[in-house]
Amino acid sequence: RPDQTRPDQTRPDTETNKQTVTIIHSSSENQPIKAQDEQDHDDDDDHDHDDSTTVMTTQAHENGTSGSHTTANTGETGAGTGTGRGPGGKGPQRIPSVSKSLTLPHQLPHHPIHGHGAGGGGRRLPQSQASIRRFNVAVENHSPANEIEQLGILNAFPLGKDVPDMATALDKGLTQDWKVIEEELETYGRNELPKPETDSYFMLWIGAFNDIMMILLMIAMIVLYAVGDPIAATAILAIVLIATNIGAYTEYSSNKEAAKLGDLPGVSLVRKKNDPKAIHGWVQVENTQLLPGMIVQLKTGDIVPADAIIVQQKGECHCTEAMLTGESEPVHKYPFHHGIPEDEEHATTKRQSMTRLYMGTEFSGECAALVVETGARTEMGRIFESMAEEDPDLSPLQKMIDRLVVVLAMLSIAASVLNAAICIPTGRGVEPDEEDPQALVCTLNSVALTVAAVPENLPVALVIALAAIIKNLASRGVIVKSLPAGEELSRLNYVFSDKTGTLTKNEMTARAVVTLEGHVGLSEDFVSPKESKAIPTEASTALTDQIRLLAARAQDDVRANPTGDACKKAVSDQVVQNVPGFERHLLETASSKTKMARAAVTINGQNYLIKVGSDWVLRGATKQATLSTDLSNLSEDSLDPLDETFCENVINTWATDGYRVICVTAKPVNTIPEEIVEGEEGDFKDGFIFLGCVAIQDPPREDIAKNIEIIRGAGVVVSMITGDNPITGLSIAKQVGLASDFTEEDMRMCLINAFELFHNVEESDAKREIHKRLHYSMTHKKGLIIGRVSPFQKRWFVEVAKAMGLVVAMTGDGANDAPALKAANVGIAMGNGSDIAKAAGDMILVNPSFSGIVEAIRAGRLGFDNILKFLLFLLGTNVSEVIVYLTLTFVNIVIVLDALNLLVLNLLTDGFPAIALSLEEAEGDLMKRAPLRRDTSVLNGFTYMSIAITNTGLLISYFVVILLGNEWHLGDITGLSTDKVDDYENGLEKVRMMFILLINISQLLLGFSHRCPDRSVFSVGFFSGKWMNYASLSSIAVIILMTHIPGIKDIMRTDYPDLRSYLLVVGMSFLPFIIHEI
């Protein structure tokens, strides 16, 4: 308050390590807060703000000769803290809507910047350093005893446990009603990562109209409405609506499925003692409802729900931040007030990371943490928002389709204009006794020509083909977020696969107990290293059981620890029974400092100190156990001096083969110590016996070797890319078949330690080296084993591979993988990965198994094959219709088909078979052929030849039927005679019937033939395709109904021809099929 100086703020020199921070909430945050020397020039302006209040807090010696003033200010660019120091100055300044002041410890982990001035406020900090949300909380009784209680929640800066009121804050927690908290949520936003921007169904549907083919059809529809043919116009509208809705629905459904995987799950325990639902002062709150200032409880295995800092802890705390950094090693976390070593190693940025818990990371330990950022303001949220919104490259098929549509559009327009130019002035192609104006008839014929030239079913069939890929993969646990990604899979020829969880099970398993005299396998599929020998279980039961039990009990209190879980699973009831009188007294779990767990145990009345962990436990070991060693009945005679060299060789042998080795040492003592002092060796320094090790491994998936063989047989090179040691990666690669045939030269070129290779190397030089390695990989068809790789280095590998013309897939699960996932042609995110990875990827593997990648490639190739089939079919049939139409106009033969006839034929005769071809089953084994090159066009010499052959057969049959039909039913093939006789009554309707049936039957037969574009359909069975069978029956049934049912046939303007006409139609229908088969 401006008129009140707090007497309790006067402290002696010994307490100058405290500082005072004014916590504010600004209702006009675009007003910067100015230091005192700046405000002197703006007094007039300051008086204009009614919501401004002068606030001073001082902290001075009793003689009043000096003082300090600290303010937190909010302005246009953010908020920050500053300290102004001057001789006895109070440093008053005006700030908007002051909330209150709190006393904090000196060491603020996130905002250590201070400004100096004569009694004024400190300098403002940029927005990036203003990480704590301000709440507008009314303050009435401003005294240290109730300041936290009045504030309700810790809403500005973190409070440490050495602050006098911290106990009160931790005791009571939230004091606001949930209604108030809900209002704050509405204002501040929920704790949710920004969802990837996806269009609504309506916008996707509108976007589907942005297509040249759709635009042409819409123009044709408008013209038909204008000239008075609403039936044909309505039919075109139906085609357009069907095509656009199918595409929009497919993409919308995929986006919804992908969004479901990105929801932030779970609840957190928030301190709110006065809540009736609270249990022991903690109440469950959905993670989306967390706000800065709330105190949450975290325990081992929890996922940190928001950015937070520890204010109270029990024992050591760690976070696994691989999602952010790619580093699998847990990071030791300190309370923000804890004394962190002030040396070069712990610079300001590192201090921040050591005191901050980041959203989405895995926590180990137990603490109460103060939420400081939520949602998009978290580190995870900032990465999400800063992720480059690059427009994805169009796939080759998309580019080809776009070019094809442009060509068809130009040909359609040119043909229509040419037809109109010939027909309107001359009347060619118009029935002599036509009652409608000649110009109108010619316009309708030109529109019909546009309909004939445009394959209306191409968008529908294309969408269905790609949607079939997506649906097929979805049933196998692979969600494809975009239709183009499905096509890109058909060209995939290089995969960068993560190791953990994709190639392996992500389940650490104890595979063997290792002693210096041999090992005992613990799993059925265990394969021992060549350098180590197996020993009979009976000869080593006592020792190996004790090693297993000690390794497990040293990690009992560490939950969600894969290594500890593996050791514990290796201990059966029988093992426990085999170790009599076992009791654990003390335990200090492993930490990043000690690299080991220490404990005090009793076995059969004998007390032991034990150390369990990495090979660090060998320090202090002087003797080694033999197979006859039994801790329950220890005999000094059974112990030999420790052979350190031999011991290290044994350990390294197992480590080289991809095992994590957990060493166990023990020391007999007379009495159990009262406690284990952290950081002090004491009785744990020396005199230990090396018993042996537990060899742990994340085993490969059962089907991975088979899938690797399949994918390599398909011409796809698979490389492993991991943050682990490349030697460990090499071991797994050998087991799964990636490196089983490596030569010495392969090892030199394909085994990469990215950290060593690219350390202090310019990006351009690094990419040249990557190009050399990738070129070797593709030339020799050997995958790279890349270890110790960083996120930006992953992207380098992807970018270089794409620049080489490769079609690249990248798998990943962490936020650090997002750049590489986005850069790849096909980004494959794991279903159990981070939201950012799933947003960046084109596909999501719900079950993170390599088999999903194999299925994706197979489905992509099948989809591409089917797209090629119906493209050849549609182009072959539609081009022939355009040629026939123009030819009839040139030679002045009456055009027998109008726009409605052509539209029905294109929809039913072309449409059903085209859709059936898009759903065809695979021909042979798709995974035994090489992938298509990225620059391979669908329209090549083979396709042009196929189209030409199809059109040749169709044109011959079309002209034969039209000429004979005109001769038989019109009496004059030129159509110029105006004489009519009874025998020729309804002759045009009969010829139209013949032509419709001819197109229908001949194109259905061609549909069967196009099931196998490069060989005879009889090689796979003429009726073996169920979808083509359904399509044929449906098409024939509909055509018969529309041409023979009274009323409907009048709309189609058809009539029944004689028997010879039917026989001619059937005979000529087989001609295109026979030519295409030959």
Image: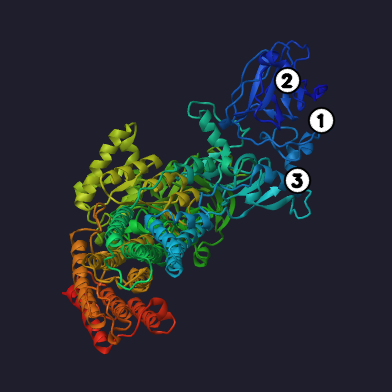
Along the viewing direction, whichever of 373 and 481 lies nearer the viewer:
481
- The amino acid type found where label 1 is placed reads Ser
Q: Residue furthest front?
A: 979
Reading the image, the residue beneath label 2 is 46
Residue 351 or 879: which is nearer the viewer?
A: 879
Spot occupied by residue 399 in the image (x, y as percentages of width and height):
31, 52
SS category of the residue bearing label 2? helix
Cβ–Cβ below 8 Å for labels 1 and 3?
A: no
Left or right of 175? Residue 944 is left
> Can the viewer see residue 588 in this picture?
no
* Residue, disc 3: 180
Judge the density around disc 2: few (<14), some (14-19), many (≥20) Cα neighbours within 10 Å: some
Instruction: Where is residue 324? Give x, y as percent.
Output: 48, 43
Residue at position x 70%, y 37% in the image: 155
Q: Amino acid at mark 3?
A: Val
Q: Which circle marks residue 143 in the picture?
A: 1
Left or right side of 632 for 900: left
> Where on the picture, by quarter, is residue 333?
top right
Q: Nearer the viewer, mark 1 or mark 3?
A: 3
Measuring 21% from the left and 62% from the top, which residue is drawn there? 943
Question: Residue 33: x and y, percent?
Answer: 66, 23
Please tell me whether residue 561 is drawn above or below residue 977 in the rendered image: above
Residue 740 at x, y percent in the picture: 25, 56
Element marked by disc 1:
loop
Instruction: State whether residue 179 is above or below residue 966.
Output: above
What is the distance, in whole Å, between disc 1 and disc 2 at their CAs? 28 Å
Q: In the rendered structure, which disc, 1 or 2, sits on the residue that comes first in sequence? A: 2
Residue at the farthest left position: 1078
- Earlier residue among tags 1 and 3: 1
Element class at badge 3: helix
In the picture, which quadrant includes the N terminus?
top right
**Callout 2, which amino acid?**
Asp
